Amino acid sequence: MSQENVEIVRRIIDATRRGDWGAALRDYDQGVILDQSRMPGGGVYRGHEGLREFYGRWFGAWEHFRIKPERVIDAGDEVVDINETSGRGRSSGVAVKMRSANVWTITRGKVVRQVAFPVASDALEAAGLSE
């Protein structure tokens, strides 16, 4: 089952990179919790409507935005993705680049929780792994 979970996360990342929100949402549970509270301007969002709200605001804030996946790691009951995110703020013009990560919890083939970490090592630690 864990390889299937890794593939679910990869599908979501690929759909997000393409801007295909319909495809990305298919793999999220209706009651998903998206915890962006550790990230700049983040919070906690619930359900598909919460995902749409957060990602619409987040992606709308960038003139140019890119997610470059580094690794997707099977962590038993969870999956960790580590990525490099870069962009240029739409209103500020400031270039930003960071290496961040997410811890994904998947139940019965659907993402039920996604927690973002601004520091990849913190996500690995939360999932019981080390870099």
Image (cartoon, rainbow, N blue to C red):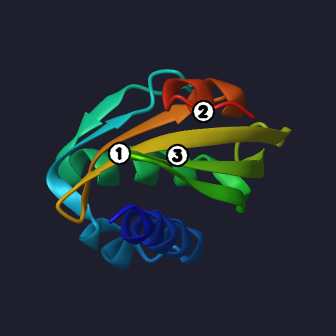
Of callouts 1 and 3, which one flags the residue occurring earlier in the amino acid sequence?
3
Circle 2 Cα neighbour tier, 10 Å, few/some/many (<14 / 14–19 / ≥20): few
Residue depicted at x 44% and y 22%: 37
Circle 3 Cα neighbour tier, 10 Å, few/some/many (<14 / 14–19 / ≥20): few
Say what secondary structure mark 3 lies in: helix
Of callouts 1 and 2, which one flags the residue occurring earlier in the amino acid sequence?
1
Q: Position of residue 95 (x, y in %)?
A: 86, 42
Please count the marks in the image: 3
Question: Of 5 and 57, which appears nearest the observer?
Answer: 5
Q: In this rendering, does residue 35 appear at all?
A: yes
- Is mark 1 in CB contact (under 8 Å) with mark 2? no
Of callouts 2 and 3, which one flags the residue occurring earlier in the amino acid sequence?
3
Residue depicted at x 47% and y 40%: 103
Quarter of the image containing the C terminus? Answer: top right
Q: CA distance from mark 1 to mark 3?
A: 28 Å
Q: Amino acid at mark 1?
A: Asp
Q: CA distance from mark 2 to mark 3?
A: 28 Å
Q: In the rendered image, which residue does mark 1 sit on?
A: 77
Q: In the rendered image, which residue does mark 3 sit on?
A: 58
Q: Amino acid at mark 3?
A: Trp
Disc 1 or disc 3, which is closer to the eye? 1
Q: In the rendered image, which residue does mark 2 sit on?
A: 129
Question: Of 41 and 111, which appears nearest the observer?
Answer: 111
Outermost residue toward the left in this view: 31
Residue depicted at x 58% and y 53%: 73
